[in-house]
């Protein structure tokens, strides 16, 4: 199981990269001021960091109990990313609708679009993170 400092490093690197990937193109594509999109990105980042920390801790507990922290291949990474995004979509819907003053339908469509992007990003990031910082076998 990963240590708490490792989990913090994992979360912070993920969010810093994500912030840059969303703030600038998001403002351009949605024709919103950069301050608005930047603030939304920061709020989403805080929300996602909290969820990331809690979710990955719970995932590791499950993995240790049911899989013995076996090597994580494509299948487990797909399940991991999909479940993470499902939790984040639920919380993000309300944040987007409120901050951008959108209907829930429009916010849902934007949230799903962001989630599709982050599904791929989370899969790639977590796989790369496991290669760069492998999960300790005896942990």
Image (cartoon, grey):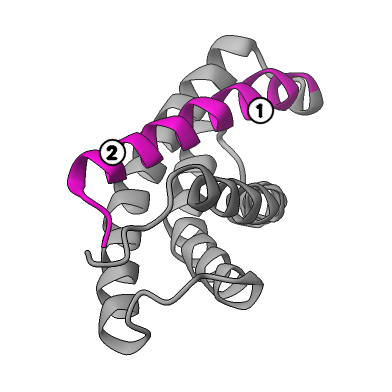
Q: Give the range drawn in magenta.
A: 1-28
Q: Which residue is depicted at the point 71% across and 55% down?
A: 116
Q: Where is residue 112 in the image (x, y as percent from the top left)?
A: 67, 56
Nearest to N terminus: mark 2 or mark 1? 2
Residue 66 at x, y = what percent?
A: 32, 88
Which quadrant is the C terminus positioned in?
A: bottom left
The residue wearing badge 1 is 21
Relative horizontal placement of residue 39, taking residue 47 as reference (left or right): right
**Residue 75 picture quarter:** bottom right
Observer-nearest residue: 132 or 26?
A: 132
Residue 36, percent across and down?
55, 18
| 63 vs 24, nearest the viewer | 63
* 2 relative to 22, above or below: below
Report how far apart the C-alphas of labels 2 and 1 lie in the structure.
20 Å
Name the residue that disc number 2 marks.
8
Camera-side residue: 78 or 131? 131
Label 2: how many Cα within 10 Å (few below 14, some 14–19, many 20+): some
Image quadrant occupied by the N terminus: bottom left
Hey, which residue is sitting farthest front in the picture? 138
Rendered residue at 47%/20% (across/down): 39
Graded by Cα atoms within 10 Å as few (under 14), some (14 to 19) or many (20 or more), the crowding at tag 1 reads some
SS assignment at label 2: helix
All told, the count of numbered labels is: 2
């Amino acid at each position: 199981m990963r240590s708490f400092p490792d989990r913090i490093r994992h979360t912070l690197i993920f969010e810093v990269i994500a912030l840059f990937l969303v703030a600038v193109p998001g403002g351009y594509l949605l024709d919103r001021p950069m301050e608005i999109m930047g603030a939304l990105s920061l709020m989403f980042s805080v929300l996602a960091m909290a969820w990331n920390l809690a979710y990955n801790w719970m995932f590791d507990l499950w993995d240790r109990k049911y899989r013995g922290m076996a090597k994580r291949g494509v299948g487990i990474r797909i399940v991991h990313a999909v479940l993470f995004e499902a939790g984040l979509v639920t919380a993000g819907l309300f944040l987007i609708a409120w901050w951008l003053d959108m209907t829930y339908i429009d916010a849902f469509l934007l949230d799903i679009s962001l989630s599709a992007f982050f599904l791929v990003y989370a899969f790639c990031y977590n796989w790369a993170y496991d290669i760069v910082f492998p999960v300790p076998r005896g942990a």
